[in-house]
Image: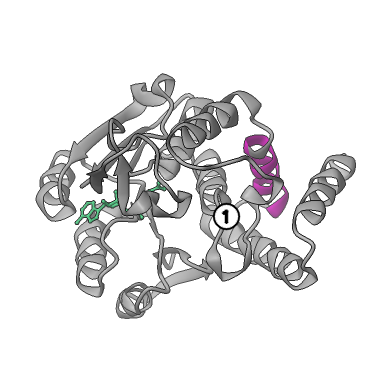
Amino acid sequence: MYLFRDLSVWASRVRECRDPRLLASALNHDQQRARLLALATGRPTAISADYLREVEDDAPFLTEVRGKMAQWTPYTPRAVDFMMVGRSGSVFFNEVTLYAIVRALRPAIVVETGGTPGKSTAFILRAMERNGAGHLYTIDLPPAEVEGDKLLRRETYHQQRPAGAGSGWIVPDSLRGRHTTLLGKSSEHLPPLLKTLAHVDIFYHDSDHSYQNMTWEFETAWPRLQPGGLLLSDDVLANSSFFDFCRQHDLVHCNVFNLGAAFARS
Ligand SMILES: C[S@@+](CC[C@H](N)C(=O)[O-])C[C@H]1O[C@@H](n2cnc3c(N)ncnc32)[C@H](O)[C@@H]1O
């Protein structure tokens, strides 16, 4: 049913990326992601694949997100934005993965740390909008504002904020209804937030990637994720904190490059 669409997507990627090694690596990452999605959601691979197509073809949403990126950074949309491009990562690979997880699990409460530029926030909120359910709490200590209303390199948007852009500057305003932002460090906001929430369905770490902070966030969020919650983390290859945590708590876990998912054995 989707054969023509998928062939056309890959044809565009091949036109943009002519390196066969990168394309082979991207295919491999797609397969690893299918396994992660099956494990994390407990749903057949075909369902997650449908959700990935749904968001990659979501023209109104992507036009808005990409418009904000082009406004604040030197960005031009490309077909390879959704593909893992070597070890440098990709623009939206992790984000569409998050989208598929939220669509499949239909969480009531998601908590994330690290919210600028706001790609994860935008994709999680779009999935919640489509679900017609859910609320996202984002704890973010935004990067320092720099002079000039446009960053010189797109890759700096995790470390710098263009003048006039707030926390999560990518997030479309129309999606803010299901969103609460807490500005400041996770060490300041996470414990009191978790006290107000009876249960968290998904926790996603993407703030300060030091071993100490990642471990602290995992240990702090984990009790509220039980029973049956999902722990997600970006930058799991930055250090061994994610894998150490999973080993110490005997969790089922897997990762696709930097994105890790873990949950308790049933
Ligand atoms: C990698 S970026 C987050 C990217 C975001 N998840 C996205 O998809 O666009 C890291 C963010 O965490 C913020 N940050 C750094 N240390 C933090 C801390 N201790 N608590 C909360 N946020 C922090 C950074 O300023 C930045 O906004």
Q: Position of residue 229 (x, y in %)?
A: 37, 53
User: Is residue 105 among what the camera can see?
Assistant: yes
Q: 55 or 34, which is in the foreground?
A: 55
| 167 inside magenta stretch | no
Helix, strand or loop: magenta stretch: helix
Quadrant location of residue 262?
Answer: bottom left
Q: Residues within 10 Å of mark 1 (few under 14, many from 20)?
A: few
Q: Is residue 134 left or right of residue 37?
A: left
Q: Is residue 151 left or right of residue 5?
A: left
- In this figure, what is the number of numbered marks? 1
Quadrant for the N terminus in the image = top right
Q: Residue at x 80, y 47 (%)?
A: 12
Q: Position of residue 218 (x, y in %)?
A: 26, 63
* Magenta region, residue range: 45-55
Q: Is residue 15 left or right of residue 264?
A: right
Indicate whether 245 appears above or below 155: below
Is residue 256 placed above or below 44 in the rendered structure? below
Residue indicated by mark 1: 42
Secondary element under disc 1, as helix, strand or loop, is loop
